[in-house]
Image (cartoon, rainbow, N blue to C red):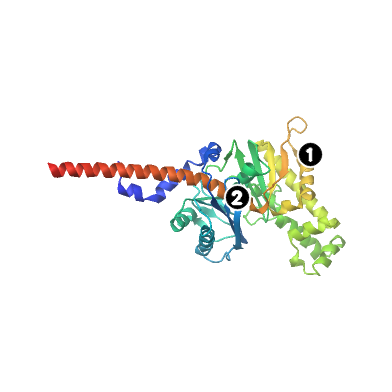
Amino acid sequence: MSTYRDFTHRGSARATVLRTVGTRERRSHLSAPRVPTVGIDIGGTKVMAGVVDADGTILEKLRTETPDKSKSPQVVEDTIVELVLDLSDRHDVHAVGIGAAGWVDADRNRVLFAPHLSWRNEPLRDRLADRLAVPVLVDNDANAAAWAEWRFGAGAGEDHLVMITLGTGIGGAILEDGQVKRGKFGVAGEFGHMQVVPGGHRCPCGNRGCWEQYSSGNALVREARELAAADSPVAYGIIEHVKGNISEITGPMITELAREGDAMCIELLQDIGQWLGVGIANLAAALDPSCFVIGGGVSAADDLLIAPARDAFRRHLTGRGYRPEARIARAQLGPEAGMVGAADLARLVARRFRRANRRRVERYERYARYTETRRTTQDSA
């Protein structure tokens, strides 16, 4: 029998509702309410928030710097709340989706670990839901980006999709039959920490030879700076560009110089692309998707990166020549993918939450009627 405590204890009810979302994503996005929701993408350097409609169109977007990671998680939480309240002044917001750069548990409540923020087993969903008074969903940022590309971008119409996000490191996500595969503990898709070179470069994760040490923004910048520090003749172009300040070399700068024809920068992007293709071939052997979508900041290099990746993929693919090859496409939604995907996933939670809340209200009303009838009967007796 329901009690008033069951009705008012929203945290556990919301958790139960959210646990049902994953198994029903495929059909529920088709019938989810066409209401605006807020998506938030939290990275190591920026927090981006936007109101997104049911067609994936961004109605308004705000961006601010991520508070310093040495500060308490409360500071980042305050930043999120301020952005949502600001957007809520001008839009009727029904739910909030968070795409976090970190490991999120299977219930999509706690951020278990975020390498660029001070989140360690942080109950982000419950904390924000209590403050915002609307349903909140938390997911890994790569999962959110993959969902957006499947719904509105380069992966539209694909039943088996793998997304790889190339930024500071490598993130990833798996979608199968319209459902994000998060794994038993919620941390599937951490492709960047597959070991590709035993005993190779040390990775911040604690291991050596991880894929992201050879195909990521960090790897690209590290190689360019090493060549420049060695005063290599091939690096004279970029050394002159930064006026000898090697620490100012960045990934976007390398991409820009490559587009202008700098031979070293072109070669570095080709190297990164070759390693990308090797990793994709390994993932194809394990997962056999129909499509790989390449996103993240490094993907802005486009064919300077993706063309070498396609070549390496074909050379290293298991059973090459005797099996269909997955399509490799560049993401279409750019840096807003994580925000759009988080907002779209939040629409599912809004629907589930409203239904569950209505059922709780109905149960409470029935119980109230029952207790009133019983009290009246006792009084008359």
Query: Is 210 in front, or is 357?
Result: 357
Please give left or right for residue 367 compared with residue 103 in the image: left
x, y (%) of residue 6?
34, 47
Residue most extreme to the right? 233
Amino acid type shown at disc 2: Val
Residue 208 in view, yes or no = no
Query: Is 308 in front, or is 135?
Result: 135
Query: Is 1 in front, or is 95?
Result: 95
User: Are the residues tagged 1 and 2 within 8 Å (C-beta)?
Assistant: no
x, y (%) of residue 115?
59, 57
x, y (%) of residue 96?
52, 52
Q: Which mark is residue 315?
A: 1
Numbered disc 1: secondary structure: helix
Query: Is 151 in front, or is 103?
Result: 151
Which corner quadrant of the image does residue 30 belong to?
top right
Q: Nearer the viewer, mark 1 or mark 2?
A: 2
At x 84% / y 65%, what residue is drawn? 231
Which corner quadrant of the image does residue 48 belong to?
bottom right
Residue most extreme to the left? 381
Numbered disc 2: secondary structure: helix
At x 77% / y 61%, what residue is drawn? 253
At x 36% / y 50%, what residue is drawn? 9
Residue most extreme to the front? 90
Q: Where is mark 2, residue-wise?
A: 340
